[in-house]
Image: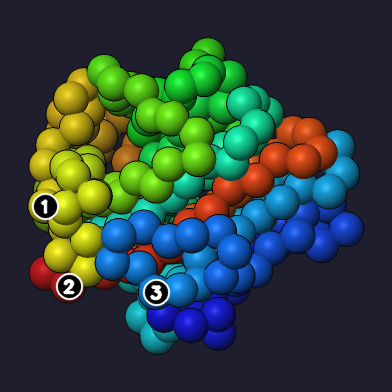
Amino acid sequence: MSDADWSLHTGSLGTSDVLRGVSTAYGTPNGGDIFAFGFRSVSNNAGVVALSNNQSNFYPIASGKGVSVRGAVKRGTTADDYAIMLYGAMEDKNVTADGYLLGFTEDEDAAHLVLIKGSPSDGILTTSSGILRTSNGTYNRNTWYHFRLDIIAQGWGDTHIQLFENADLATDPVTAPDWQPIAGMSEYIDDQNGVQSGSTPFNGGYAGFAFYTGAIGRTAFVDHVQVARQTT
């Protein structure tokens, strides 16, 4: 996908707070091209930059349909106060809208990977409300990881969420991943009555990636982001 395939959500921080764009300076994951997309906060203003795929039938994805979001992500060299995440089934194209978020905790080093039902504007803390799953293992800074978030809408009203990791990115490139379950992050069933999560499930909507920052000098990177919609 090109830059033209992504649109900022309303409420995203401007470039006076977060610089963003592609460069050949960041390195890329195995199988990536020479460019990666980077973020760097240049103020202490807390907030989010969120970008959704804006191609036909994706902006938004039709109600009642799921989505698969896949991408390589890397945290920068600073330890805390920022989070990089993939998201899907976002209810609106606003950074305060809720969806399913998959990202690293911002208050740990090394960080856990968590699945949250909530808004990217709240960041990702180990104490965040809405956490649905937490990885057993942790993930280091300045290292590329490749994840897949599948949000599957069911005809009876539930939403099933399945999470995968490219098990050995050094061996299996982003172009030919070996998707494996993530320890501690088994399938989550968000039931139509909201018994499990406390609210009714999401489907359709917007999908992409986001960067949350709470302080100056925070950096994170994404590459090879793919979005596929459920058609049946």
Q: Please give left or right for residue 22 compared with residue 67 in the image.
A: right
Q: Is residue 170 visible?
A: yes
Q: Which residue is mark 1?
A: 178
* Image vertical order of residue 57 relative to residue 92, above or below: below
Amino acid carrying label 1: it is Asp
Distance from disc 3 to disc 1, alpha carbons, whole Å, reads 19 Å
Residue 91 or residue 56, whichever sits in front = 56
Distance from disc 1 to disc 2, alpha carbons, whole Å, reads 24 Å
Image spot of residue 58 (x, y percent):
39, 75
Looking at this view, name the residue that lies furthest to the top. 127
**Residue drawn at 22 percent across, 28 percent down:** 185
Q: Which residue is mark 2?
A: 231
Of the image marks 3 and 2, the number of the one nearer the N terminus: 3
- Indicate which disc residue 225 carries: none
Secondary element under disc 3, as helix, strand or loop, is loop
- Indicate which disc residue 33 carries: 3
Contact? badges 1 and 2 (CB < 8 Å): no
Q: Please give left or right for residue 122 compared with residue 214 in the image.
A: left
Amino acid carrying label 3: it is Asp
Secondary element under disc 2, as helix, strand or loop, is loop
